[in-house]
Amino acid sequence: MKETITTSLTILLFVTLISFKTSNDSADKIIGKWILPDNIKIEMYKENNKYFGKIIDISGFKNGQIRDIKNPDKNKQNDKLLGKIIISNLEYDPKLKKWINGTIYAPQKGIELNLKINYAKENELEAEASKLFFWKSIVWVKLL
């Protein structure tokens, strides 16, 4: 009887660890380098269980724009876009299987939008940006 309980607990622990690992692997699907439709290349990374994205390449963006000229804060309009963190605080919700509660800064318009990621596949993901009642879904392609 004692051996059966020990075996059952061992199996339960093993299954729990596997499901936790699978959940984290799913959440980390967005880590990597992506190209957005406006030719900005970003790198997504994880810090303190939240996801962030910074600009790693701007060649081909907005007629050669390299500074944050549309930023509503005049003191930041001369800041370089390269290296700028434009995605912040995304959290993975394992029940929804989506990344939620994040923000994205759009340097082409100088605005910050709410961000969620609806799905992530091996080579693409669907990001949804919104402000008030307006929203737009865009597909990002993974850089290989």
Image (cartoon, grey):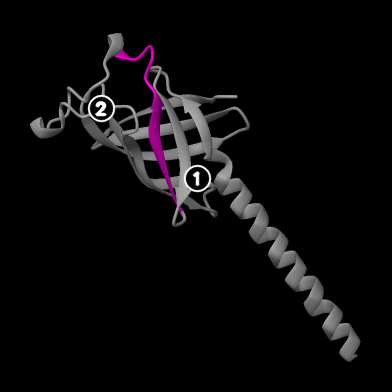
In the rendered image, residue 59 lying in the magenta stretch gets the answer: yes
Residue at the bottom extreme, as displayed: 2
45 to 64, vertically: above or below: below
Residue 98, disc: 1
Callout 2 secondary element: loop
As shown in the figure, which amino acid type bears the numbered disc 1?
Answer: Lys
Q: Residue at x 43, y 23 (%)?
A: 36
Percent across and percent down for residue 100 are 41, 47
Percent across and percent down for residue 122 are 63, 32
> Would you identify the image quadrant in which residue 20 lies?
bottom right
* Residue numbers of the magenta segment: 50-62
In the rendered image, residue 130 lying in the magenta stretch gets the answer: no
**Horizontally, is 79 left or right of 74 in the view?**
right
Callout 1 secondary element: strand
Residue 80, disc: 2
Residue nearest the viewer, comparing 52 with 115: 52
Percent across and percent down for residue 8 are 82, 78
User: Mark 1, residues whose alpha carbon is within 10 Å: few (<14), some, or many (≥20)?
Assistant: some
* Mark 2 touches mark 1? (CB < 8 Å): no
Residue 137, disc: none
47 to 119, vertically: above or below: below
> Would you identify the image quadrant in which residue 134 lies?
top left
> Would you identify the image quadrant in which residue 1 lies?
bottom right
Magenta residues: mostly which secondary structure?
Answer: strand
38 to 51, vertically: above or below: above
Residue nearest the viewer, comparing 93 with 112: 112
Q: Residue at x 22, y 31 (%)?
A: 111
Who comes first in sequence, dot 2 or dot 1?
Answer: 2
**Horizontally, is 15 left or right of 111 in the view?**
right
Percent across and percent down for residue 135 are 32, 31
As shown in the figure, which amino acid type bears the numbered disc 2?
Answer: Lys
